[in-house]
Amino acid sequence: NVLFLDNHDLGRIFGNLDGNLEKFKSGMTLLLTLRGIPMMYYGTEILMTGSGGAFGKGGRKDFPGGFAGDENNKFKERDRTKMEREAFDFLSTLANYRKQTTALQTGKLTQYIPQDGIYVYFRYDADKTVMIAYNSNEEPVQLSTERFAEQLAGFTSATNVINSKTIQDLGMLDIVPHGTLVLELK
């Protein structure tokens, strides 16, 4: 299965999410951590927008840069906006983690029925267990992990894959509005 959020026939995902960076990050997290082969359309990593696919308004714009005389060269960090850098760095971190983590490539999936706007699933194999928690709410949430006890059995802490911070208490997890946590369980 190939999973995608946008392509040459669809509006670009960042524009479809009204330029909301947190929603974009969550969408990309789901894309890169759910079962299947993730496909990213060129320019998604720098938040390109446009709609209508091949014949619409901007669906197939050239990637900015790479040719002599281009004013902006988004291949270079210095020519990306702060938000573009944040999106690029986020995707780079998560995509490289996926590349190194067989649990996300070929591991099993256990998911829980969403409750109160929170969707939680685990990807795991013999080497690693990764917990993903998505908050679809407009408000931050504190997620009690009691109902995930079976999957959390034996784990006492976690590393946040995106910011490398250690989480010592797995009992309650804070998730920002429209945010997603990717936790490697320890």
Image (spheres, grey):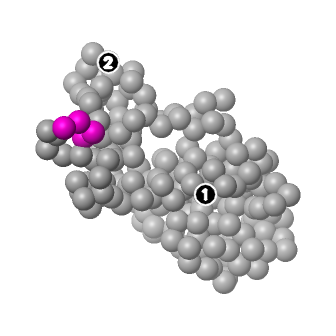
Confirm whether residue 115 shows in the render: no
The Cα–Cα distance between marks 1 and 2, rounded to whole angstroms, is 32 Å
Q: Nearer the viewer, residue 157 or 78?
A: 78
User: Residue 27's spot in the image, x, y percent?
Assistant: 48, 47
In the image: residue 33, left or right of residue 25:
right
- In the image, residue 97 sits, relative to residue 35, either above or below, namely below
Q: Which mark is residue 56?
A: none
Q: Is residue 65 left or right of residue 69?
A: right
Tell me where residue 135 appears, x and y as whole percent: 52, 59
Residue 128 picture quarter: bottom right
Q: What kind of element bears circle 1?
A: helix
Instruction: Provide the residue designation for mark 2.
Output: 54
Q: Amino acid at mark 2?
A: Ala
Residue at the (56%, 73%) spot, across then down: 164
What segment is highlighted magenta in the picture?
A: 64-68
In the depicted structure, whether residue 84 falls above or below residue 151 = above
Q: Quadrant of residue 88?
A: bottom left
**Callout 2 environment at 10 Å: few (<14), some (14 to 19), or many (20+)?**
some
Location of residue 127 with respect to 39 vertically, above or below: below
Pick the front one: 142 or 2: 2
Residue assigned mark 1: 97
